[in-house]
Amino acid sequence: MSKKKILIFDDDKTILEVITIIFEENGYQVEISETSHDILEKVAQFQPDVILMDNWIPKIGGVEATKLLKNNEEFKNIPVIYVTANNDIVALAEEAQADDYVAKPFNLVDLEDKVAQYIK
């Protein structure tokens, strides 16, 4: 069975390291990106099962990046979980057309559960 793939967009290196370790230990294949302007290329290349998207990410930001994906026929069905410390997380996730959201600072178990929900 092939590994489930998770693509993480976040510009916080510490968070990227922690999430990567956790998900790799759980048997996922993890790819990370610190910018989101080339989201379509990254997704086409990696073909992730789930995407974690930070709000404050360089170049175009999480909302715009997620919209690009959700308005793309080929990729719109890939679940995007919005991850941010913003107080308006619900509104932002909705605007971005994300499938779900997790507030920072997050509980790793919650994050793992959310991802597991979307990985069929």
Image (cartoon, rainbow, N blue to C red):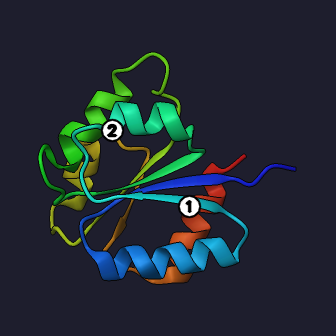
Where residue 69 sits in the image (x, y, percent)?
A: 36, 31
Give the residue furthest to the right. Answer: 1
- In percent of width and height, residue 20 lies at 51, 73
Measured along the vertical axis of the image, is residue 67 above or below residue 11?
above
Residue 32 located left or right of residue 26: left
Say which residue label 1 marks. Answer: 30
Give the quarter of the image for residue 43.
Answer: top left
In this rendering, would 80 be left or right of 21?
left
Give 52 or 18, whichever is nearer the viewer: 18
Q: Which residue is mark 2?
A: 39
Please give the name of the residue rendered at 33% of the width and 21% of the height, measured from the top-left corner: 71
Identify the residue shown where x is 56% and y is 61%. 30
Let me know if residue 83 appears in the view: yes
Dot placed on the residue nearer the N-terminal end, 2 or 1? 1
Query: What amino acid is labelled 2 in the image?
Result: Ile
> Depth check: 12 or 117 in front?
12
Q: Residue at x 28, y 37 (%)?
A: 38
Q: Indicate whether 24 appears above or below 38.
A: below
- Amino acid type, mark 1: Val
